[in-house]
Image (cartoon, rainbow, N blue to C red):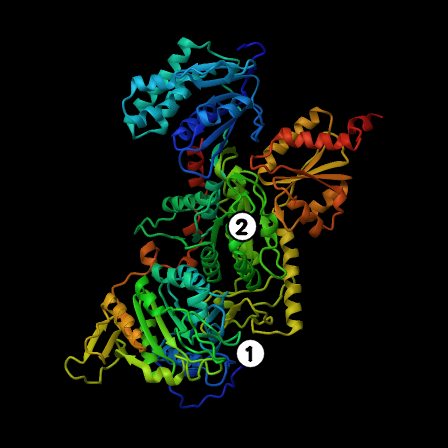
Amino acid sequence: MSTTNAIQSSNDFVIKFANVNGSGSASANELFARAIMRMGVPVAPRNIFPSNIQGMPTWYEMRVSAAGWLGRRGGCDLMVAMNPQTWDRDIAEIEPGGYLVYDSTKSLPRSRFREDITVLGIPLTEICNREYTDPRQRQLFKNIMYVGALTALLDMDFASVEKLIADQYRGKDKLIGANVNALKLGYDHAKANLSCPIGLRVERSNGVGDKIFVNGNDACGLGAVYGGATVAAWYPITPSTSVIEAFSSYCRKYRTDPDNGMARYAVVQAEDELASIGMVIGAAWNGSRAFTATSGPGISLMQEFFGLAYFAEVPAVIFDVQRGGPSTGMPTRTQQSDLISCAYASHGDTKHVLLFPEDPYECFTLGAQAFDLADRLQTPVFVLLDLDIGMNDRLCQPFDWDDQRRYDRGKVMSEAELEAGKNFGRYLDVDGDGIPWRTIPGAHPTKGAFFSRGTTRNAYAKYSEAGTDYVYNMERLRRKFETAKKLVPAPILNRASQPSRFGAIYYGSTSAAMAEASALLEGQGIHVNTLRVRGFPFADEVIDFIDEHDHVFVVEQNESGQLRMLLMTEGQVDPKRLVRVLHYDGTPITARFISGKIAGALSEHKVTPIRKQVAS
Amino acid sequence: MTYLAKPKLLRADAPRNTLGYTRRDYEGAISTLCAGCGHDSISAAIVQACFDLDIEPHRVAKLSGIGCSSKTPDYFLGASHGFNTTHGRMPSVLTGAALANRDLTYMGISGDGDSASIGIGQFAHAMRRGVNMTYIVENNGVYGLTKGQFSATADKGSKSKRGVVNSDTPIDLAALALQLGASYVARSFSGDKEQLIPLIKGALRHRGPAFIDVISPCVTFNNHAGSTKSYDYVREHNDAVNRLDVILPRDQISASYAPGELRRIVQHDGSVLHLRKLDKDYDPSDRVGAMNHLQERHALGEIVTGLLYVDTGAEDLHRHLNTVEKPLNQLGDAYLCPGSKALDALNASLR
């Protein structure tokens, strides 16, 4: 076991913890991530967990990046191997020159290690068995103990980790002492028995700034509170469950009437996804802002209701935290594979509005905006995030809110307007934007009542099977979708440092890896303009961007290139100009993957780097 | 189905309720159901019940699923908002609507296919959840719009128009509603408006899930010999346990009853249910007894009707959720949005 060529890096490496799920490792690992962030160094942790409660392998991967890259890098510089089940693959994953921390209580044959890594054994079980009698404590403090050892190995400040523990367990003082004690046991053992620090180090920095550390599901729940949602109906499904839990918890905090303790919101756990979306549609039809949160299988179940909401023109907000499909697929792995099933959800000619947040900050802002859009457009609006940003805490810009902002309730005809004799036709396009006026049940004693239905009707909501009425309605819906183009959030353009004939389009959680990939490519002299799509239907800028480039890479986390399909069908783009860059094994896409694919594709096509062209 | 407006002729001396509305104000479009359809009698009973109770038509929301029964909300309460939803899913849409505005009266109209087959899950959970509503199933034992297939309430051994004998066990929605926690459960017959109208009135004045199973013969596909949902069969086997009169606080009580014949039940809003006993041993406050009675009589081929169960102290979904008194759909921005200051504090806690 040599230490030659051991990786030397300050504030830029990947640590991975291999644990058994249900062993209490998650909170210790998170504590460690926070400790690094408290030192001002950006960290992007990711939980890679099984669809299981106890006993199966789980990993916690932490990207430490002074440059602030928050995408998954790939590879692992330091493995904390705590799970014998996955030992071999964990050892194999360590980069040459990397480090291994393991529980050395039982000696392992030399053959189970590698020659090109630094092995750091700590007899965690032995120390725990010596120090604790309670079996649960023996398990839990083993985790805190390796955090203590890492604090020493990475040259971190013990006092600041200690303070973090105190902050975390404030009010539960008993736990503070016990945890700090375990931390110290690990720290002292490493200091006394291992050569500290190793080549990987954490140094104080100011890379975190005022950023917050939060997960996207939490931010969606908060966005729904700020967006004015009063009714949430849902059915538990991984990885979306915590959206509603967060909404409920923020509502208890912010929406409890201070005078009487009563709730200014209603959350109902329905019997299934069909009932969830049914309740959302009923509440929104009746003038409340309402939403549900689900994942792929739920989207499949809700299809008929999406068609009703589309055709009867009822607002609805759906947070779809995407996971690996099809069918039950990979419930605890990430993908962006529900675009098509959401964009065209339900039978007949339907089209829906989609939003693609890149991180928790946008989960909040687009989440809140979704309610305005749904009311304005009187249609379902899907917020498509995924497990990677939904369930992992991510550094992002702090949440903000303009207190002058008022909810846009869209075209709701008031009692006074009805009383004054304003012409009301529920499906009449009076403004030319395809969006009709609606009334809220109970508004006026004699005017404005209508019968909502999924069947065809005329502009005054009366049942009709006349082809002319049907066509009028469908053409109006098409106009409404055109209007939506201008209302969805605009795409974000990033130009390469030099002019380029190549572009890349991406969306959602791919953002962090794409930004880093662009930098990697720039470093190789490859310049690619990038455009982050934030909404569907596509704003004109999206199609213009494609027109400006010879080839555009469409970077996605699904197998079939679903955004590309949408660009082809909705943007009339020549498929040959849209090059697929697809990552879909269930792990978050990496910068190395994207840059490798793009660089590879460009060299295959014998593309001369732009720099040379410009120079010549 | 075509939409026809009814002529606006009105007799000058048409009776008006205390709000000044005539019965015509509670009617809807002309029905497109078959002549003699039991469902039209139920629509008429709803019109009468709302007229009698002085309900403002626009303060009612009427929701339905898919099927002949679910078309009927177009044929009554034309000044009310209505929502003809998807097949079997009316209960969830109604639940959402009721969450948004607790101040309206919610009427769910469904059929035996809509509630006992495709929608049995939503039917069951809306009952369990305590949604404040009047849920009426217009029960004819067949699918009308698709021309006469058995539904899940068709009795075992009953014969279809084409001569097929049903071999499946029937679902008794009233019995299910009792088991699932509905707090007002009744069964009636569309051919008996004297019984039906008061039962609807009692349900509309009830707080909590009120369920009425109305046997409503399908004249086209299920009114022949061998059917257990025909006019003749139901008349012959109608086993009413009581007769209801709903007395509003404003009403003078004029009828007199023999001692022991009457039971008075006061609802949460002060309305009084006067129950004239037809079966002296039947106790409509005994949920388990009601379930047993239904099963026993069903085994004898009888159709038990009347107010089967009522719990006037029941709490509804809003009470369970502790929602504010003001309807959620009327809370303004200031009541809903915590604002930027709260966000600053939250940001600080996330660092």
- Residue found farthest to the right: A616
Q: Is residue A51 left or right of residue A580?
A: left
2 vs 1, front mark: 1
Dividing the picture into quadrants, the one containing residue B261 is: bottom left
Q: Which mark is residue A370?
A: 2
Q: CA distance from mark 2 to mark 1?
A: 36 Å
Q: Residue at x 50, y 28 (%)?
A: A61
For label 1, the SS is loop
Which chain hosts label 2? Answer: A
Query: What percent of the width, then of the height, locates residue A216?
Result: 50, 40
Sort mark 2 into few (<14), some (14-19) or many (20+) by Cα contacts within 10 Å.
Answer: many
Q: Are both tags, 2 and 1, on one chain?
A: no
Front residue of this view, candidates A344 and A57: A57
Residue B111 appears in the rendering: no
Dividing the picture into quadrants, the one containing residue A176 is: top left
Q: How many marks?
A: 2
Front residue of this view, candidates A491 and A245: A245
Front residue of this view, candidates A387 and A516: A387
Q: Is residue A150 left or right of residue A471?
A: left
Q: Which mark is residue A430?
A: none
Q: Residue at x 46, y 39 (%)?
A: A51
Q: Residue at x 46, y 18 (%)?
A: A101
For label 2, the SS is helix
Q: Say which amino acid is labelled 2.
A: Ala
Q: Which mark is residue B3?
A: 1
